[in-house]
Amino acid sequence: MADRAYARLKRDIIEARLRPGTVLSDSALAEQYEMSRTPVREAINNLRREGLVVVLPKRGTFVKPLDFGEIHDLYTLRTLVEPEAAVLASQRSTEGELTELEELSALSTDPDVEKLVLNERNSRLHVRIAELSGISLLATTVRAIHEEIERCLNLRRELGRPYKAVNHGRLVDAIMTRDEVVIRSTALSGIERARDHMMSVLTRHSGVAGEGDS
């Protein structure tokens, strides 16, 4: 039951059904999820440790507000780790695993699928590339980065400015060349473009970021 509460609450936060700055009530969530308050409390505590939930003394428990500086820094971290993850994936992947990346790339840009699903597939592709690097800590880091980015993408979707992946095919094609220079360049250009677009949208709609609760 605790695992179910954790998974449900985490997806509600990442998919922006619970927006940044939303007050979290264990009793209300328990009623919504049709379970007791104990697993909900445990889920809230676990997500607090992961950074998706914040507790403010004398104020309450909230979905973590968006921090524009932190989001910018997440993209900086991406520039440091994801190009190298892609290079390692190119060196260590089998042909079958490279084909898997092609399939994931295609799924992440399927025009017939709703944006919420595409955003999750976007994260899955980047995490899978990191997994294929063969370094578990690197994959864990990229997963944490993309959970927060997926939350931002889903907020963009609600604002009427959905994200459209344009670099996935180029990145996978670059990985398949196994050319380190091409891979790094392609990964970096995609990350920088994504950061510019993300910061532009969120800055224009700063009122939804929950800064008032930070």
Image (tube, rainbow, N blue to C red):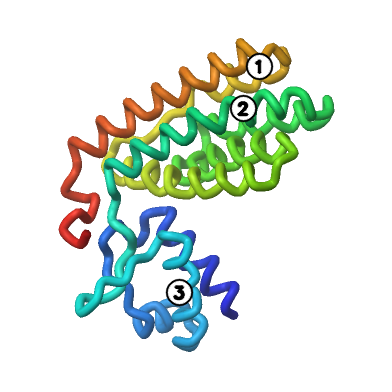
Instruction: Name the residue located 46 percent from the left edge and 79 percent from the top edge.
Output: 40
SS for dot 1: helix
Q: Nearer the viewer, mark 1 or mark 2?
A: 2
Tell me: 89 left or right of 73: right
The amino acid marked with disc number 1 is Asp
Tell me: 73 left or right of 138: left
The amino acid marked with disc number 2 is Glu
Instruction: Tell me the quarter of the picture where residue 211 sits.
Output: bottom left
Confirm whether residue 110 shows in the render: no
Which quarter shows the C terminus? bottom left
C-alpha distance separating marks 3 and 1: 41 Å
Instruction: Tell me the quarter of the picture where residue 41 sits.
Output: bottom left
Q: Is residue 121 above or below residue 187?
A: below
Q: Nearer the viewer, residue 40 or 83?
A: 83
C-alpha distance separating marks 1 and 2: 16 Å
Residue at the disc numbered 2: 84
Dot 1, crowdedness within 10 Å: few (<14), some or many (≥20)?
Answer: some
SS for dot 3: helix
The amino acid marked with disc number 3 is Asn
Check if mark 2's residue and mark 3's residue have beta carbons within 8 Å.
no
Residue at the disc numbered 1: 173
Residue at the disc numbered 3: 45
Q: Is residue 74 above or below residue 9?
A: above
Residue 103 in the image: state x and y as whole percent: 69, 30
Instruction: Name the residue located 64 percent from the left edge and 31 percent from the top edge.
Output: 85
